[in-house]
């Protein structure tokens, strides 16, 4: 298939006919340490539809990456899925063997990590690695795989021929992250997990890559789980969002709802802690009280840092639907709903 034909095929994926069926369904996912049985992620429920971008927010240590690693079947050996299930395209992936998961990773689930250096083996040229990845998932000749790799390097706006013949260390951070974007997208997965993909880059390079990513995601009509502790990225690009604290989801809903009508005190503090560029009087930034990761042993996990904590917060708040498609786990928020 020529480059032009390949481009046409991708650009003509008929998104009008594609249904908005659920692609990824995480149900009651809990992840524990094998030795102590301590839960690091607890009862996480998330749904991602086809073509949708779902954002996962929360401070460091809130359980975002572990949730993503569980979807990829890449939890480290000392951790395990203690409860719950993960369904991708109707297939229960929490039951798959490592061999089956290896087939799934790359072809059905693409991933882009924070440490983009890890996407490539240091001593093998980028092109050779891309060609091998393509040929392990598609029945293509070396020449066809090379054409496909070059086309994707082009699509992520890199000087394709030069990057193809380079070793990973010869690329800048931004170029490497673009190359890992190409490497994830070229296998045309239905789901891409991007875990802090721009944290290691400067602001402008990071913004440009996320914009490019959003454009390509739209063209390919794939679903994305975008993880970031930077709300700015998520508010700008995602369709829906979930906010995690202490291994649990404390609020989730459509991104516009979270932006304009958040009800959980933690989400509100996260929103107020972000700088907003405005012509009007600059907004005063509020720091979130207490240390990130300070989790109360009993009751609401956010109680030790919450300015609204009250007697009832000694018991664990359930994640309840405060309005259609908008959920929060907070006694104060649920009281407000009943007013
Ligand atoms: N292999 C491990 N063994 C023990 N604890 C772990 C392990 N991996 C993660 N944790 C703990 O699990 C919790 C959630 O970790 P996770 O990496 O998912 O956080 P995160 O939200 O991705 O944070 P960050 O924004 O810093 O990437 C943290 O308290 C972390 O210390
Ligand atoms: S349940 Fe209580 S402590 Fe937890 S966030 Fe709501 S008000 Fe704050
Ligand atoms: Mg992480």
Image: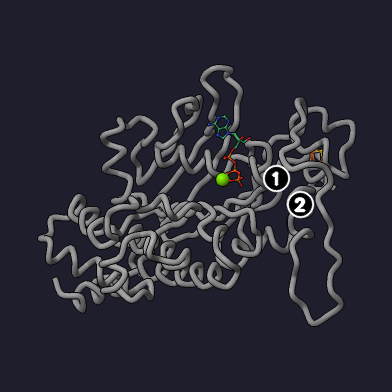
Asked whether residue 217 is in view, the answer is no
**Residue 205: x %, y % from top left:** 53, 71
Relative to residue 246, is residue 50 drawn left or right? left
Q: Quadrant of the N terminus?
A: bottom left
**Residue 57: x %, y % from top left:** 62, 51
Q: Are marks 2 and 1 in contact (CB under 8 Å)?
A: yes
Where ligand 3 lies, by quadrant?
top right
* Whether the residue under disc 2 has CB within 8 Å of ligand 2: no
Q: Secondary structure at mark 1?
A: strand
**Residue 232: x %, y % from top left:** 65, 64
Closer to the chain start, of discs 2 and 1, is: 2
Q: What residue would you read off at disc 2? A: 263
Q: Secondary structure at mark 2?
A: loop
The residue shown at (89%, 31%) is 311
Relative to residue 83, is residue 62 drawn left or right? right
Residue at the extreme bottom of the image, as rendered: 279
Q: Nearer the viewer, residue 240 or 127?
A: 127
Distance (Cα) linking label 2 and label 1: 7 Å
Q: Nearer the viewer, residue 54 or 68?
A: 68
Q: What residue would you read off at disc 1? A: 328
Asked whether residue 20 is in view, the answer is yes
Q: Determine which quarter of the picture holds residue 230.
A: bottom right
Q: Residues within 10 Å of mark 1 (few under 14, many from 20)?
A: many
**Residue 10: x %, y % from top left:** 28, 70
Relative to residue 57, is residue 90 drawn left or right? left
The residue shown at (65%, 51%) is 326
């Amino acid at each position: 298939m020529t480059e032009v034909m390949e481009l046409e095929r991708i650009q003509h994926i008929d998104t009008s006919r594609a249904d908005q069926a659920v692609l990824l369904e995480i149900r009651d996912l809990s992840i524990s340490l094998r030795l102590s049985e301590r839960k690091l992620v607890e009862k996480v429920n998330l749904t991602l539809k086809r073509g949708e971008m779902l954002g996962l927010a929360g401070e460091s240590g809130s359980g975002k990456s572990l949730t993503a690693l569980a979807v990829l079947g890449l939890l480290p050996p000392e951790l395990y899925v203690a409860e719950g299930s993960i369904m991708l395209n109707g297939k229960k992936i929490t039951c798959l063997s490592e061999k089956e998961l290896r087939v799934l990773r790359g072809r059905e689930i693409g991933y882009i990590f924070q440490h983009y250096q890890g996407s490539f083996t240091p001593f093998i040229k980028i092109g050779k690695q891309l060609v091998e990845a393509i040929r392990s998932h598609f029945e293509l000749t070396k020449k066809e795989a090379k054409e496909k790799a070059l086309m994707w390097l082009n699509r992520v706006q890199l000087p394709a021929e030069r990057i193809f013949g380079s070793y990973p260390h010869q690329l800048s951070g931004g170029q490497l992250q673009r190359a890992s974007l190409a490497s994830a997208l070229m296998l045309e997965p239905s789901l891409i997990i991007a875990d802090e993909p721009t944290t290691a880059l400067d602001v402008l390079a990071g913004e440009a890559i996320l914009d490019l990513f959003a454009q390509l995601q739209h063209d390919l009509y794939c679903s994305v789980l975008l993880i970031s502790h930077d709300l700015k990225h998520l508010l700008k690009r995602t369709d829906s969002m979930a906010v995690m604290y202490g291994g649990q989801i404390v609020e989730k809903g459509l991104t516009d709802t979270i932006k304009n009508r958040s009800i959980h005190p933690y989400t509100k503090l996260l929103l107020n802690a972000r700088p907003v560029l405005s012509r009007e009087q600059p907004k005063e930034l509020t720091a979130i009280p207490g240390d990130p990761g300070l989790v109360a042993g009993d009751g609401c996990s956010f109680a030790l840092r919450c300015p609204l904590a009250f007697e009832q917060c000694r018991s664990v708040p359930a994640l309840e639907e405060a309005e259609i498609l908008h959920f929060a786990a907070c006694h104060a928020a649920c009281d407000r709903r009943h007013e």
